[in-house]
């Protein structure tokens, strides 16, 4: 039996951003639609852009869960750029050459850990969904072949 194959959409989130409402709603819808099919949104709160994530980890998670019903993993608040950037984001940036310049940057990571693509804050989840479903389709076909 093969290990769990998981596609991830890694996002640096913020509670007080102009993109907060639309993105949290869309991210939760994505998690609802695809979460049971080898997929997870991974949310990393970040206060580096416009100080739009000032609260504690507990308050941030509570806000996301209560306001948007967020059921995806919420990590501790981190830095995503600069010298103190979290190792995961350093990897995402090195892999894509795309460094977050604002909240709600999105990185699509394949099950093998390779970063497929990055999108900035202005790109909607709807625009990204086809890339995710294509990766998921490949996993499902691969699993069928292994049966």
Image (tube, rainbow, N blue to C red):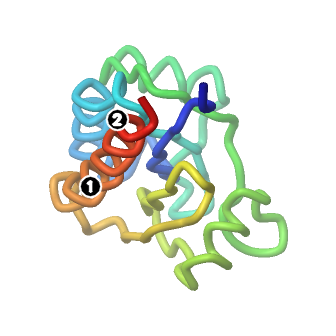
- Residue at point 40% right, 45% down? 142
Judge by depth and name the residue closer to the eye, 39 or 49.
39
- Residue identified by numbered label 2: 144
Image side of residue 36 versus residue 7, left or right:
left
| Nearest to the observer: residue 147 or residue 24 | 147
Q: Tell me the quarter of the image containing the N terminus.
A: top right
Q: Which residue is mark 1?
A: 134
Rounded to the nearest angstrom, the CA distance separating label 2 from label 1 is 15 Å
Residue at position x 51%, y 62% from top? 50
In the rendered structure, the answer to whether residue 138 lies left or right of residue 10 reads left
- Label 1 neighbourhood size at 10 Å, few (<14), some (14-19), many (20+)? few
Badge 2 marks a residue whose secondary structure is helix
Number of residues whose C-alpha sits closer than 10 Å to that of mark 2, classed few (under 14), some (14–19) or many (20 or more): few
The residue lying furthest to the left in this view is 126
Residue sitting at 72 percent across and 69 percent down? 90
Viewed as shown, does residue 29 lie left or right of 90?
left
Residue 137, image x, y percentages: 28, 47
Image coordinates for residue 131, horizontal then vertical, percent: 27, 60
Nearer-the-camera pick, 129 or 20: 129
- The answer to which of marks 2 and 1 sits earlier in the sequence is 1
Q: Which residue is at a point 71% across and 67% down the rendered structure image?
A: 91
In the figure, residue 26 lies in which quadrant? top left
Give the position of the C terminus as an image quadrant.
top left
Q: Residue furthest right?
A: 83
């Amino acid at each position: 039996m093969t290990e769990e194959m998981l596609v991830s959409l890694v996002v640096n989130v913020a509670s007080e951003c102009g993109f907060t409402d639309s993105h949290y709603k869309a991210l939760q819808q994505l998690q609802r639609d695809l979460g049971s099919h080898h997929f997870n949104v991974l949310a990393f709160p970040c206060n580096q852009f416009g100080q739009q994530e000032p609260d504690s980890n507990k308050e941030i998670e509570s806000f996301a869960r209560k306001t948007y019903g967020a059921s995806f993993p919420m990590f501790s608040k981190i830095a995503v750029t600069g010298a103190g950037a979290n190792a995961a984001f350093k990897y995402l940036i090195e892999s894509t050459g795309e460094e977050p310049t604002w909240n709600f940057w999105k990185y699509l990571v394949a099950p093998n850990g390779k970063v497929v693509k990055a999108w900035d804050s202005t790109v909607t989840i709807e625009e990204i969904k086809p890339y995710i479903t294509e990766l998921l389709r490949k996993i499902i076909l691969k699993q069928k072949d292994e049966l």
